[in-house]
Amino acid sequence: MATTTAPVTDRQAATGGPPKSQKQSGWSRRAPLLPALIFTIAITQAPFVLTIWYSLQSWNLVRPGSEQFVGFSNYVDVFQDSQFRGAALNTIIITGSCVVISLLLGLGLAILLDREFLGRGVVRTLLITPFLVMPVAGALLWKTTMFDPVYGIINWVLGPFGAGETDWVSQYPTISIVSALVWQWTPFMMLLLLAGLQSQSKDVLEAAAVDGASTFRTFVSVTLPHMRRFIELSVLLGAIYVVNTFDQIYMMTQGGPGTATSNLPFYIYQRAFLGFDVGQAAAMGVVVVVGTIIVATLALRLIFTSFVVEES
């Protein structure tokens, strides 16, 4: 029986029997995901391909019959547009300021919440609340309740110091936008960093304390290296989300005064729905998407490298 079984097994291996069954089982596992994959491609990749086609056209909606193929002329005009470069600079300033400040505040709050104290659950819930507020509602809240020159809380607090009549949104639009964004995104940073702190082994902290390391030295030499991947992930996700900011800018400043807070998404909106220049707006959108993909890819490689190094 043993001598007859071996040739059958070899024949099955030669004809690809077991690999075929493995392939079928693999497709049976992937089949339930195909509808979601097709849906994702339909709502993301198909519009992007159509946007690329529009970016190669010269098309203004207020001039019927103006649609014509111009190749990469729109892309040349985009990179020569000084307002586009200004919007890109505003995007970098707003995104960088929001991410850095939110990260520092989130790290401080995460360190506080990592300790045991009475009412920690209630405090954690209250700190998460700003992240659950709709961006439009949060922008209106800051514009009318906090920054209003007559009834705003900030002017009421600063009134005794001689700064009670400042129109913050008009005089300091970038600071106003960044303040609203920091208030909204600090809880997001806090949650990610708190997860990193709670994943740290307590034995390592106890060993550092036994060796005589101070609290500050333990934080710098032990906790921060452990938190590297969480900090990088927080910066990456925060930058991806904040770079697409539109709600706060539209509701608080409408991009003004002038183009002071006109970031890339808002400037693309202006060219598409106020200037009706579909071709250049599409080219700007493609440039922004490609730039975001490049930066995100480099950041992801950095994060994955840190994971591999720590595991090894």
Image (cartoon, rainbow, N blue to C red):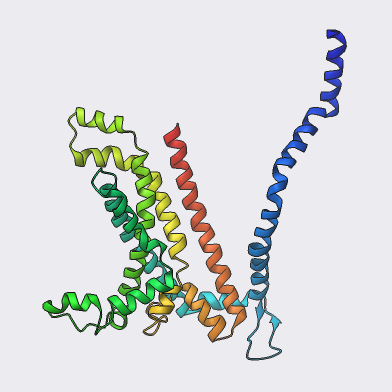
Where's residue 252, x and y in %? Answer: 38, 79
Task: Answer with left or right where residue 61 lies relative to residue 289.
Answer: right
Towards the viewer: 32 or 72: 32
Residue 146 on image: x %, y % = 28, 75
Observer able to see residue 255: yes
Q: Residue at x 37, y 68 (%)?
A: 94
Q: In which quadrant of the rendered image does the C terminus lie?
A: top left
Relative placement, left or right, of 33 versus 229 is: right
Quadrant position of residue 117? top left
Residue 125: x %, y % from top left: 34, 55
Identify the residue shown where x is 45% and y is 73%. Answer: 247
As drawn, 269 above or below 114: below
Vertical relation: 203 (above or below) 164: above
**Residue 89 against residue 293 in the figure, above or below:** below
Q: Quadrant of the N terminus?
A: top right
Looking at this view, is 40 or 294 the one in front?
A: 40
- Observer-nearest residue: 190 or 172? 190
x then y, percent, for residue 194: 35, 47
Q: Quadrant of residue 171?
A: bottom left
In this rendering, would 104 be left or right of 245? Answer: left
Q: Quadrant of residue 155?
A: bottom left
Point 45% across, 33% down: residue: 311
